[in-house]
């Protein structure tokens, strides 16, 4: 480890600021601060690659090409701010498989123009999240054809949702709630996220396919595309190769990244990290014909219930599930608490946890990516976990992965001595 720290100390660590925004812990020596981050990541890697997490490790483990020291990548970006990492990384050919060290939140706080996200505070440093946009979000930027199509679709579906007050009925509301559960819980959180992205449990293929198709109806992309993108988020969380890092601003992490195809594809276009799905004819079909399934859904809703069904079970429900999913990427990375030292900005956020069927216990998830349960405490409601337990009792879910108490203790943030 001494060798690791020696290498890190040569990687551009900045002197700590003396402004009042920093807690007492922030004034630790730079080497000590990096040592803490390295120790944290080593513990996290140990948890991730344990026997219980073996299946999940394929998407996040460091390359075995000699470029890792103690499982921690040590390129020249260690100890840098996100802003400086971004400028350097994108000035060279990208290697989206190379694991990079997490940015230093203290260094990021010093970046000219960086601003704290309101009410954000957390992590071992006790700092607000300081963000600085790296791309123009709306004006003075080039829009690709795909950007224009996607922006037009987003405007249309949001406009359709605004018709909800004029088409209200309790029957339509019931359809909205039913589709919210089917596409949000069964489709996104249960299938796309916990089963397909992290392989936290196993079901018979016919059950897996039904759940995955529920995700298709959420209109968040085909399963392979969604899974690949999400695995990159975990591999590069909060670094410049993360497709939606909060260090580029709350709006970017929430929705802005979806409206800049060039920036996003530079990070996630290589879908080979979803190779476990690529040979499956079912997922091949959805990847190739996804658009027709989306169009078919809208047509079916209109034929079954006319404009009110299209508005409530279609537009309003889709927009609602969109923003809850996006709040996991944005709100759950700036607001809430951190029980486990993950090295990133993931937080446990109670209201996202409720609306997102358990997905808001996001710090728990980033600590134990393989876990089928995100609400690890009894006071952390997790509807998706309830469904998984039900499937398990019915004999339809097996190989259900959970962190051990030893693993949880290894990453738990210890109270600061008074």
Image: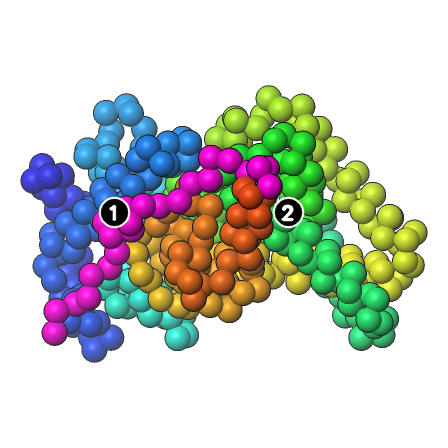
Residue marked by disc 2 = 187
Residue 149: tell me if it is visible.
Answer: yes
Query: How many C-alpha atoms fall within 10 Å of the one at disc 1: few (<14), some, or many (≥20)?
Result: few
Residue situated in front as seen by the camera: 323 or 196: 196
Query: How many C-alpha atoms fall within 10 Å of the one at disc 2: few (<14), some, or many (≥20)?
Result: many
Say if 235 sits above or below 67 in the image: below
Q: Between tags 2 and 1, which lies in front?
A: 1
Which residue is most to the bottom? 20
Picture residue at 31% right of the left edge, 66% below the top: 122
Residue marked by disc 1 = 406
Residue 119 appears in which quarter of the rendering? Answer: bottom left
Q: Quadrant of the C terminus?
A: bottom left
- Whether residue 378 sits left or right of residue 412 in the image: it is right
Say if 54 sits above or below 340 in the image: above
- Whether residue 40 sits left or right of residue 294 in the image: it is left
Which residue is most to the left? 2
Residue situated in front as seen by the camera: 164 or 153: 164
Residue 245 in picture, x, y percent from top left: 43, 53
Disc nearer the start of the sequence (2/1): 2
Picture residue at 58% right of the left edge, 25% below the top: 278
Say if 121 sits above or below 290 in the image: below
Residue 154: tell me if it is visible.
Answer: no
The part of the chain drawn in magenta is: 394-418
Is residue 408 found inside the magenta-colored segment of the image? Answer: yes
| Secondary structure of the residue carrying numbered label 2 | helix
| Secondary structure of the residue carrying numbered label 1 | helix
């Amino acid at each position: 480890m001494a060798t690791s720290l020696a290498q890190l100390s040569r990687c551009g660590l900045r002197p700590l600021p003396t402004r009042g925004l920093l807690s007492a812990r922030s004034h630790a020596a730079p080497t000590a601060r990096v040592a803490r981050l390295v120790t944290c990541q080593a513990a996290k890697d140990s948890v991730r690659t344990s026997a219980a997490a073996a299946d999940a490790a394929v998407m996040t483990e460091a390359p075995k090409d000699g470029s890792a020291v103690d499982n921690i990548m040590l390129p020249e970006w260690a100890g840098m701010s996100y802003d400086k990492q971004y400028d350097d990384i994108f000035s060279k050919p990208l290697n989206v498989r190379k694991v990079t060290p997490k940015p230093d939140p203290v260094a990021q706080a010093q970046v000219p123009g960086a601003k704290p996200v309101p009410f954000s505070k957390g992590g071992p440093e006790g700092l607000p999240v300081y963000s600085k946009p790296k791309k123009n979000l709306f004006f003075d930027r080039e829009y690709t054809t795909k950007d224009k199509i996607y922006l037009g679709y987003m405007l249309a579906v949001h406009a359709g949702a605004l018709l909800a007050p004029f088409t209200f009925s309790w029957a339509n509301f019931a359809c909205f709630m039913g589709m919210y559960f089917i596409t949000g819980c069964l489709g996104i959180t249960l299938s796309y996220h916990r089963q397909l992205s992290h392989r936290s449990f196993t079901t018979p293929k016919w059950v897996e396919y039904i759940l995955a198709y529920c995700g298709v109806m959420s209109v968040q992309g085909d399963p392979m595309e969604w899974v690949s993108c999400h695995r990159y988020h975990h591999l590069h969380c909060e670094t410049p190769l993360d497709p939606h890092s909060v260090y580029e601003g709350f709006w970017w992490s929430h929705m802005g990244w979806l409206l800049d195809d060039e920036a996003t594809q530079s990070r996630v276009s290589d879908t080979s990290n979803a190779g476990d799905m690529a040979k499956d004819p079912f997922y091949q079909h959805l990847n190739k014909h996804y658009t027709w399934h989306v169009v078919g859904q809208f047509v079916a809703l209109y034929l079954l219930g006319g404009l009110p069904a299209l508005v409530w079970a279609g537009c309003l429900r889709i927009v609602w599930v969109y923003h809850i999913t996006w709040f996991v990427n944005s709100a759950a990375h700036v607001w809430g608490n951190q029980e486990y030292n993950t090295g990133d900005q993931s937080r446990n956020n109670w209201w996202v946890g409720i609306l997102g069927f358990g997905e808001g216990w996001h710090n728990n998830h980033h600590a134990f990516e393989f876990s089928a349960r995100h609400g690890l405490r009894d006071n952390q409601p997790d509807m998706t976990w309830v469904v998984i337990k039900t499937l398990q009792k019915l004999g339809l879910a097996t190989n259900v992965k959970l962190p051990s108490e030893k693993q949880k203790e290894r990453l738990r943030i210890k109270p600061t001595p008074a």
